[in-house]
Amino acid sequence: MASMDGDHRTAVWLLRRYFDHPDLDLHDADLRAGLRSAMAGALLLAGEEEAALAEFRRVLSEEPPRRFRSAVLTARNELIDALQRRQPDALASEALSGLVKDVVARLKPRKALPRWGPGQATNQALCDLLRALFPRKPRPSGEEGGK
């Protein structure tokens, strides 16, 4: 809730409390991956990119193989949310571009990746690349949304 209200630092503080719990390993793996991805997204929006990327990388490396796809999808969704809240035309860092390419490669190994040079990818381009993994299908005419 705090992150949705734009208070990303409070969201990070609250989520860190969760990850400090001594019985964390007993909690559901999907919940842990989702909350760690949410914390990474909040860190990214709070301007703490290095910490955010470390948390995203942790999500991608810690989950057991049977939960891996779910964890990567969760990271993808949090990255989309964070990227669309950032300045669209601003250039993304090389490290953030690399993370996005890694997520894409893990979800769609055969997908051709853009060959951006250092400092050439914008936040919008990264967001578009992640969204293109699972494009929304157009609804047939006459069908209403939400039903």
Image (cartoon, grey):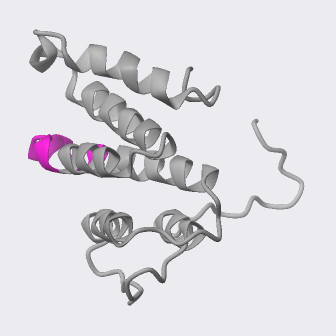
Up-down relation of residue 146 to residue 87 (above or below): above
Q: Quadrant of residue 127?
A: bottom right
**Frontmost residue, 64 versus 89:** 89
* Residue 77 spot, x, y in % from top left: 46, 48
Up-down relation of residue 17 to residue 134 (above or below): above
**Frontmost residue, 141 versus 108:** 108
Residue visible at 29% across and 81% down in the picture: 110
Residue visible at 49% across and 39% down in the picture: 46
Q: On the rendered structure, is 75 left or right of 61?
A: right
**Frontmost residue, 69 versus 21:** 21
Q: On the rendered structure, is 136 left or right of 106?
A: right
* Residue 53 spot, x, y in % from top left: 30, 52
Q: Which residues are magenta?
A: 61-71
Say whether residue 84 is magenta.
no
* Residue 54 spot, x, y in % from top left: 23, 48
Q: On the rendered structure, is 80 left or right of 69?
A: right
Number of labelled discs? 0
The outermost residue toward the front is: 47
Residue visible at 35% across and 28% down in the picture: 35
Q: Quadrant of residue 12?
A: top left
Q: On the rendered structure, is 34 left or right of 142?
A: left
* Residue 142 spot, x, y in % from top left: 89, 54
